Amino acid sequence: MNTGTIKQIKKVAIYNRKSRPDETDDGLKKNLAFLIDKCTQYDWDYEVFQEVGSSQDINRPELQKMLDKVQGFHYDAVVVTDQDRLSRTTAGFSQIKEILTNYGVQVVTSSKIYNYETQEDDLMSDMQSIVAKQEYLNIKKRLVRGKRQSAKEGNWVGGQTPYGYSYDHKTKKLVPNDDAPIVKRMYEKYLSGKTSTDIERELELEGVLTPTGTTFKKARISVILANPVYKGTVIYGKTKVSKTSKKPSGSPRQDKTDKDAQISIDNAHEPIVSPEEWDKVEAIRKGRNSKPPSARIGKVAFTGLIRCSLCGRTHSFQRRKGKELRITSCQTRNWIDDENYKICENKGVRLENFEQAFYFQFQDYVKALELYLDEVKNNIKPDTSNPADEKAHLESQIKRIDAQIKKTQQGFIMEIFTEDEAQAQIKQLKAQKEHIEAELERINTKTEDESIDELEATVNKLRDILSGDTELETKDINALLSKQIDYIEYKRVGDHKAEMEIKIHYKGQTEEQEDEQVS
């Protein structure tokens, strides 16, 4: 190395990178130790930037942070093991080199100091960048071939380990862990006729949490129920890097591949559920997801609101012979044993008949809102409260309710409460919490006058809906009703003469208030 150049360097940035998360940290630590030794040897002040990231992507957080400081004239040089740690693509390296050159920053590697302002170093760096890119492509091809061969042998090469499994580095197989029984229970509950929403509520009731400490949401439960890995199957190559589409960050998107291009191996590892159980769950899922387009895209004012009184499934809608719009019969399968099941008995009905029963009940709610609005308007007083004190009080109430929910969950686990008792108590506590959170939001974002104006606008829109004079589109009516209503409990059992029963569950309403409704 040039002694004169070394003496000009005082302050440097160390950049250390490894390509993949599954690589061990030993190599990263050794490289960092080597780079620090070099800086110590020449008495350079240094700042470390270290990360895991692909050489194909220059939008790496630590790299960008370092380049920002380069453009603030913080460093005389960047210290790396090799140039390709910065980037292996010619385009990426060219961008980085331009920044370093413009701000007079040299690059120190284990064998050479590069000054890109000189023609010799500029040409040499370009040639090495081309070689590095070709080497990267060759390594990538070998990795892909190796992964495909490993997948054909039934090994796990699919990235993040699925919930309920651990990865055995010796056998390269998935092994059920302590969370496997929870996955097993999800499948059993679904086979018994429960929905993903039901399972979400029951797991929350029991206090079952994900590895990150959050509650299981129905979307995650659905992903688990749809993943063939739990029946012992490994699938590799479900996606491929897009050659045309990119994310806002500039990195390529992932496209789905055809099934013919995927590698699927059965009996690759120990299953958590049997293939027969998994197939039954998949059949139920496909049956439940085959909703008519009108229900999926929200063309009906009650989309997502009508829930079966017998099993909790959300009803959808269809047109009979292209004309009459109906609420469909419930199609939930309640399994009696491994081979036999019974279809839920809840029948459908003409939507027109349902609307008449609904609006007859709903008008009482709108009248109550009108009376509440008048009372608020007539009793407005100058605001002398301290928002900070009120906010602290509400936040303490929320903490108290969270603690009560946990106690109820523990009471259910210890069999102090029955499931119905625990669910009722938690539902009431959550309603209280939602009300307090709404009040907290009001304090944070709205004045009292603004809240009254918003309530008045809502009441006027609801009044127009009841009178049939609304100019709102169907999707807007659905959104407005969804803000007021948690769900509408619906029941119609028997022959074609059977009467329907409905019960509207409003957001934030207590059990006592619900009992006052007339079905």
Image (spheres, helix red, strand yellow):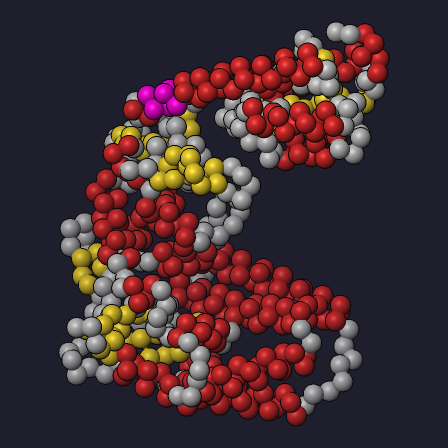
Residue at point 39% right, 28% down? Answer: 157
Residue drawn at (51%, 86%) of the image = 460
Q: Quadrant of the N terminus?
A: top right
Instruction: Residue 290 in the image: state x and y as whole percent.
Output: 26, 58
- Counting from the top left corner in percent of width and height, residue 393 is at 70, 68
| Depth order, front residue of 52/337 | 52
Q: Is residue 26 left or right of residue 416?
A: right
Q: Is residue 139 left or right of residue 76?
A: left
470 in magenta: no
Q: Looking at the image, can residue 161 be seen?
A: no
Q: Position of residue 89 (x, y in %)?
A: 54, 24
On screen, residue 238 above or below 319 = above
Which quadrant would residue 288 be assigned to in this image? bottom left
Residue 148 is one of the magenta-drawn residues: yes
Question: In this rendering, does residue 360 appear at all?
Answer: yes
Q: Which residues are magenta?
A: 144-149
**Residue that extends furthest to the front in the rendered view of this protein:** 119
Q: Where is residue 233 drawn, in percent x and y?
A: 29, 34
